[in-house]
Amino acid sequence: MTDPAPGRLLVAGTGLIGTSVALALRERGAQVWLADADEATARLAADLGAGTVIPDLRDAKGIADGAVIAVPPAAVAATLARAQDCAVADWYTDVASVKALPVTQARALGCELSSYVPGHPLAGRERSGPAAARADLFLGRTWALCPLPETSPDALAAVTGLVLACGADPVRADPATHDQWVALVSHAPHVVAAAMAARLAPSAVPGDALRLAGQGLRDVTRIAAGDSALWTQILTANAAPVAEVIAAVAADLAAAARSLAQSAASPGAPADVPGLLERGRAGAARIPGKHGGQPRNFTAVQVVIADRPGELARLFDAAGAAGVNIEDVRIEHSPGLPVGVAELSVRPDEATTLLDAMEAGGWPVRR
Amino acid sequence: MTDPAPGRLLVAGTGLIGTSVALALRERGAQVWLADADEATARLAADLGAGTVIPDLRDAKGIADGAVIAVPPAAVAATLARAQDCAVADWYTDVASVKALPVTQARALGCELSSYVPGHPLAGRERSGPAAARADLFLGRTWALCPLPETSPDALAAVTGLVLACGADPVRADPATHDQWVALVSHAPHVVAAAMAARLAPSAVPGDALRLAGQGLRDVTRIAAGDSALWTQILTANAAPVAEVIAAVAADLAAAARSLAQSAASPGAPADVPGLLERGRAGAARIPGKHGGQPRNFTAVQVVIADRPGELARLFDAAGAAGVNIEDVRIEHSPGLPVGVAELSVRPDEATTLLDAMEAGGWPVRR
């Protein structure tokens, strides 16, 4: 059962997520109150149209239907307790990226659990702060809802209404399971990317070695570029589940290394390697494709493009004129020359039409 | 010292790479002879304009200035020996992705080493065979040249001329160093991606967990989708260097796992993790950016786009009309809704112009 969007909302913590929720609800005509430990931040969010600042929660009794506690994981329980002490709303939810930690602390602080729905929207950008907030941040994104045994059905229905009002897809999981899932699909990959990228750092690796790098290395190491301090906090907050996943990856890699070393010494295919590669292929195939659901199979059409203003525009013009929808595009650059290869993904039955359009437009294609 | 492009070339092995070299030299007006163990493959390459089939190397004495041995690593030495026995050319090079193996076998077979320049163009696509070949395959790509102590300066100059004629950038390294480099930047990343993706395969991981996946997981695991059998061959051929890199990655991950497990048990930041993340960030920053050279800093502009035919075309039109060059584009999809976020990379001084053009065109932007 789901309620409609809340008519009155309080957002405690006007960072990227909190302000985005506020903007989404403002677009729905809700009354939104904004609170933040730093009042200047709340005022900035208000200036952006996110709502009205309420400087002191003690003045906020009964002011809202629901409250979104949008503060970092370590601050959730204390903020929740304060908001509940001030009786600001009928139901409460948080948005922290880990759930066991705030829940454990909320229990310890004696928070009222029947009105609390732990939650986590899977959205966000590298940029933070209210200025980066968008009303559409959650559009089509997954939003985890992790009700406790104590959580009332009414609170869950209300928070689900909030999630849907933001355009997101709710996914249910208990807090511990949620933390295992994000350890698997978000936190561990970050550490794995860092460990691969760390091999490139030593001064023993000359620049010429890196000139041999291709798109594969870039893909594997891309997320290693993140903020180390921030990620240390995230990993610390979810340490046990992340440790479990990383230990398993390390074990698989150590076994592969031993097999390869053995096959180098005495000829023969390395024992564990084909199995690991096959398991990896199967795992990667399970990741949902565009628009969720089963991974789609698109045909990739490769076109050589010059690096000039308007070149991509001409290319997409030509595709559009031919009635072809380009589902995805990736550009692989040619180090040393101002050309690149654009890989355009289209439905298989449109590939030939696109190829013809590209050649007619003068772009070399790779059939 | 570098020679001009060869006037007469023989290509032994008309797969993707061999046929592409042939096409590149045909564009330069060279006479190109094509040989393949499967004559039908050579004829296909000839039909594509790559040259003229020579069915029997015994009829090829002195037929070319140079010969490109474009067969798989395990077949290089035997093919080289045969070509040299038939005295087809003055100089020889190969294109195998590992160098120690063919070189060791060439020595064992008693090949003439003064005329042999082991080589490896860093180019190619997932698709194979002559039909996938392109004359511009090597444009702007790196091409490793690995002369032996016995290799004559004349042979090296001639092969360098070939590489430049293909539009590639030669990089020098001895064979063992080359193999360590490709282990690091190409082979090990593939195994690491597979090991992370393998964590997603077990039936214990429900579909809902994967709904939490974001772009980071997709990036890390993308190359795990490759052909397991092919990659097993590649890894086996470079087993010792790859084992070394993978063992180091495994060790770093095992240490991080232990630190995280310990910090879960007794509060405090995990010992090794900040250092690993920082080393990863530093390593990733060393990967050359677009067009080689130092990684460039572009400004990323995010635009919400609807998934309709012509939508991308309109967007690029607007950018082009504003005189903005879009350096790169990545599209992040919103599972569940037919919209996505296009992240357009532009020079920092063009970002505002682009943002204005996007808003004027009706696209929501994320400032």
Image: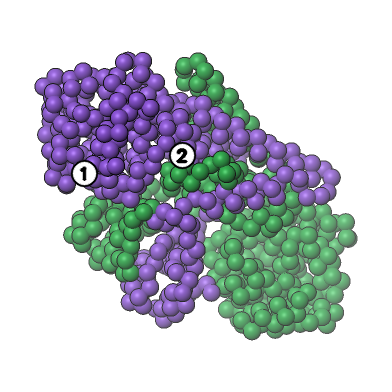
Chain colours: A green, B purple
Classify mark 2: residues with Cα within 10 Å, few (<14), some (14-19) or many (20+).
some
Q: Residue at x 34, y 46 (%)?
A: B169
Residue wearing tag 2: B186
Q: Is residue B222 left or right of residue B246?
A: left
Q: Residue at x 69, y 44 (%)?
A: A242
| Image height of A159 relative to B240, above or below | below
Mark 2 residue element:
helix
Q: Residue at x 58, y 24 (%)?
A: A258
Q: Quadrant of residue B12?
A: top left
State the mark number for residue B4.
1
Q: Is residue A256 left or right of residue A296?
A: right
Q: Give how far across and how far down residue B28 sits, in percent.
A: 17, 46
Mark 1 residue element:
loop
Q: Identify residue type, mark 1.
A: Pro
Q: Identify residue type, mark 2.
A: Ser
Q: Give how far across and how far down residue A151 sits, in percent.
A: 77, 59
Q: Chain of mark 1?
A: B
Q: Give how far across and how far down residue A36 sits, in percent.
A: 75, 75
Q: Nearer the viewer, mark 2 or mark 1?
A: 1
| Image height of B78 relative to A219, above or below | above
